Amino acid sequence: MAVPTRNFVKATAHLSCGVPLIWLSLDVLGSDLGPDPAEAVVRRLGFWGITLLWCCLAMTPLRHITGQSIWIACRRLLGLWAFTYISLHLSAFLLFWSGADTDVIAEEFVKRPYIALGLAGWILMIPLAATSTQNARRTLGKRWLQLHRLVHVIALLGLSHLIWIEKLDYSKSITFSIILIFLFFIRVRARQRKPPSIECASSA
């Protein structure tokens, strides 16, 4: 891929990832978040966090499907944007929903175990974000691939968190589940078709 094309694609992806955050900020400033602003902020940040995580997971399957490497240029930035949104999601829960009250937070963890699932997923994302650079990849070598396969565990934790939150309308959970199953299927098929040495170099 030519460098100008790669840079254009990455710049477009960055701008696209920032749009939901700008949109949310405008709604906050305009007091256009409905009867429960704190819940709206938490839920919208969480939705975009898991959406971008799924987009990150889709990059390697899209490369397998299309045979084009342009998708991989966006994988790291999508992962970092997903981490950013999920970090903001957690921060909004602690500051706005719970009012930074430790007693309320502790009570929420007891009453709503799905919060622990979400927290576990976020904690697992920290080392992935911290080692997302090329220098870290070169330094860690094969261990980098093993570490970044945690993204699959993170995805399952995030999906469980989402399913548990939804009370009556499971449309989002079903949609995200179908997409994740399809992405895993593409990855498995690609591994079966490639020699181990090639797969090891490209499976992250």
Image (tube, rainbow, N blue to C red):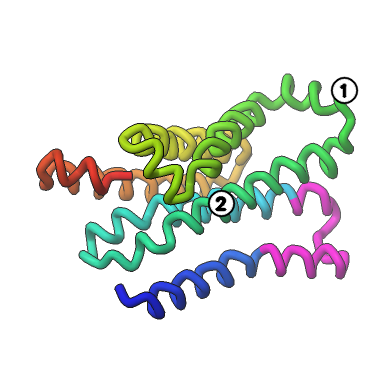
Give the percent coordinates (x, y) of residue 122. 59, 36
Q: Label 2 to label 1, Cα distance in Å? A: 29 Å
Quarter holding the N terminus?
bottom left
Instruction: Give percent across and percent down for residue 186.
Output: 25, 49
Q: Which residue is mark 1?
A: 103
Secondary element at tag 1: helix
Is residue 37 found left or right of 199 in the rendered image?
right
Magenta residues, start to end: 21-41
Report x, y in % for residue 92: 77, 45
| Residue located 61% across and 41% down the image | 166
> Can residue 189 be seen by looking at this rendering?
no
Relative vertical location of residue 95 with respect to residue 49 in this rendering, above or below: above
Badge 2: residue crowd in 10 Å (few <14, some 14–19, many ≥20):
many
Residue depth check, mark 2 versus mark 1: number of the one nearer the observer: 2
Q: Secondary structure at mark 2?
A: helix
Q: Is residue 200 visible?
A: yes
Point 87% across, 35% down: residue: 100
Q: Which residue is mark 2?
A: 82
Are the two marked residues, 2 and 1, in contact with CB atoms closer than 8 angstroms? no
Classify 10 Å Cα crowding around label 1: few (below 14), some (14-19), many (20 and above): few
